[in-house]
Amino acid sequence: MYTLGIDIGSTSSKAVVMKDGKVIVKKVLVKVGTGTSGPAQLLQNLFEDQEIQQIDIQRTVVTGYGRMSFKEADKQISELSCHARGVHFLFPSARTVIDIGGQDAKALKLNERGMLLNFSMNDKCAAGTGRFLDVMARVLETDIDDMGSLSAQAQTEASISSVCTVFAESEVISHLSRGTRTPDIIAGIHRSVAQRVGMLAHKLGVENDVVMTGGVAQNSGVVKAMAEALKTSVRVSEYPQYTGAIGAAIYAFDEAEKKR
Amino acid sequence: MPLTKRRRNDKEVFIVTEEKKASEMIKELMDKHYEDALEAKKNGELVGWAASNFPQELAECMGLVLVYPENHAAAVSAKKASMPFLEYAEGQGYSTDICSYARINLAFKDIKECEALQIPMPDYLLCCNNICDLMVKWYENLAIELNIPLFMLDIPYNTEPTVTPARLEYIKEQFYIIIKQLEEFTGKKFSEERFKEVMEISSASGLAWKRAMSTLTATPSPMNGFEMFTYMGILVCNKARKETTVALNKLAEELEERVKKGETSYKAEEKHRILSEGIACWPFLGHNMKTLMQYGINVVGAIYCDAFAKVYSNLDEMAIAYAEVPNCVNLEREVASRVKIIKDHNVEGMLIHSNRSCKKWDGFMFEMERRIAQETGIATAYFDGDQSDPRVFSKAQYETRIQSFYEVMAQKKAAAAVGEGN
């Protein structure tokens, strides 16, 4: 049985097809999110090669910031529950999840069955989110995908505020005008994100294993800074940005089973 | 039973009558509270502005007219009219970090007009710091800028589990001083006899409120919990009036009747019962209520169930009652009072408003939540917002949190049903 999980975020849309809620059969990502053509493109890309046809999909669950406006799904579930489920599928030993998306940062606490026990989220502020990194990459004239490798070249860490994106941006500009090396600034930016989001995890109580999900988990510099902030190792899957969609596809499988 | 008259289209209308629903009576009594204050001012009477937890019995027994800026600010915010006041106050140099009730009121002090709800300007101020410390500076600024007297009641925070004899003496001594000061300033006399009567009425109102709120222990709860936020205004502004006692007893009767019949004013299936923690997010009250209702989540408890219900029969007991309000007692007592509601009202989750305005409440909230979750095992969730500043709140973030909160409660319930713990 094939089920579909869709995660429509603020900056990207993801879809995962799973077989029997156990095997990832196909995954697609479109780099635009809710309110754009992203969700429509996602379905088009998913089915265009006819490898799997829409008619084969037994059930669809949608999650993410744009979940409410995606009417084609059978059910919508919050991204927190879907990330919890997705992480439990990928790392059954996970008890703490850090998810950094485009405009949200969250920490989740799971039990041994992958059940979401508690959560903590950022307030109405971009500091510590993917958007924060986007803004910094633009000022640094750097590709966001290169930030992880660049930060590995840091000799020291520039001090960057974790309180406000706008102030942090002007701090970055000040560093640049003083001639601070770009890798050092990026390392400082990663520290800032890790401190901000680490607080959310500390509030819940950090329990091993810790897993990072969301697009920002692809940035090795943030993962390293997060591990330092939490004083423990942090695990990341091969495709962290699909975690929510994986969870949604598993929930869709549960739903299909219930209807049988 | 008719007790209170008001004029409507040149006809005298009784507010408190057997025929009226409690909700109508309470609304009309609130309207009358503000109308009477405006009328009194027009007639040359002195009007005071008072902190919501100032012992209003002292003023009531002297026949003084009071208005409560906190209640006014909440009402203005619920009518989505707070922004011009907030922006004005910030333009005057008040930081956005300062309580939004204070900013609204400090702006109103200058603007003096509010289409959403007009109140008279004050001739004196009655401040009490039992629930809030910022209030002292707020009222000091009012006093200095309006050049009017400020009568201050300082109630110390209770680190100990009870109000110590020394603190009780300290508070009572201030009562005597304030009574004397008010007599001198207003020319009105304090009467022991009238004071006893006012205490009785006030306690009766408190008991009626407790009686009404105790019906929320029923499943399903007989009302949508958001109604509590509206009804409690009458206790803030008018608890020492007989008509308030009558209206609240009527409310209790109606709720008891609904419980008997298994009826409720909650317009959805009550799937999950929660405690609402923190001041309401007034600018988005309707949105908050609808979002919760979408998931069958009903508010069946809040610290307000008890907070505004003070029951006493003498000056000592009254002093203790005002010293033991929430925010003025130690963390152990704050936890215990919530745990009691959680147990009595069969609560499954606690939704916490991380309210940017109220530093004092937020200050102990995180540790309180940790202890409550540990003791009761209920689900907890936070949302960020503000009691009156709409800029702080995000609808999308709230909706995600509520859906996740619902999912956690549903999973816990399902796990408990099959005998699996957390």
Image: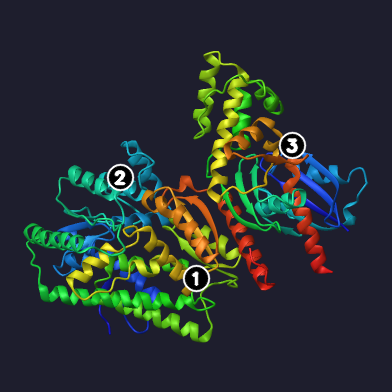
Is mark 2 in CB contact (under 8 Å) with mark 3? no
- Residue B110 vertical placement versus B345 (above, below): above
Type of amino acid under label 1:
Asn
The chain ID associated with circle 3 is A
Measured from the top left, where is residue A51 in percent x and y? 93, 46
Q: CA distance from mark 2 to mark 3?
A: 46 Å
Measured from the top left, where is residue A15 in percent x and y? 79, 46
Q: What residue is rendered at 59% in x and 71% in y?
A: B268
Judged by depth in the image, the label closer to the viewer, 2 or 1, is: 1
* Quarter containing the N terminus of chain B: bottom left
Q: Which mark is residue B107?
A: 2
Type of amino acid under label 2:
Ala
User: Does residue A72 appear left or right of residue B29 in this picture?
Assistant: right
Q: What residue is rendered at 49% in x and 83% in y?
A: B259
- Callout 3: few (<14), some (14-19), or many (20+) C-alpha neighbours within 10 Å? few
Q: CA distance from mark 3 to mark 1?
A: 43 Å
Q: CA distance from mark 2 to mark 1?
A: 33 Å
Q: Which mark is residue B144?
A: none
* Residue matched to label 3: A31
- Callout 2: few (<14), some (14-19), or many (20+) C-alpha neighbours within 10 Å? many
Measured from the top left, where is residue B231 in percent x and y? 38, 69
Question: Element type at marker 3?
Answer: loop
* Residue matched to label 1: B224
The chain ID associated with circle 1 is B
Q: What residue is rendered at 58% in x and 72% in y?
A: B270
Question: For the residues tagged 2 and 1, is the chain the same?
Answer: yes
Type of amino acid under label 3:
Lys
The chain ID associated with circle 2 is B
In depth, the one of A110 and A17 nearer the eye is A110
Pointer 2 or 1: first along the chain: 2
In depth, the one of B244 and B121 nearer the eye is B244
- Residue A171 vertical placement versus B355 (above, below): above
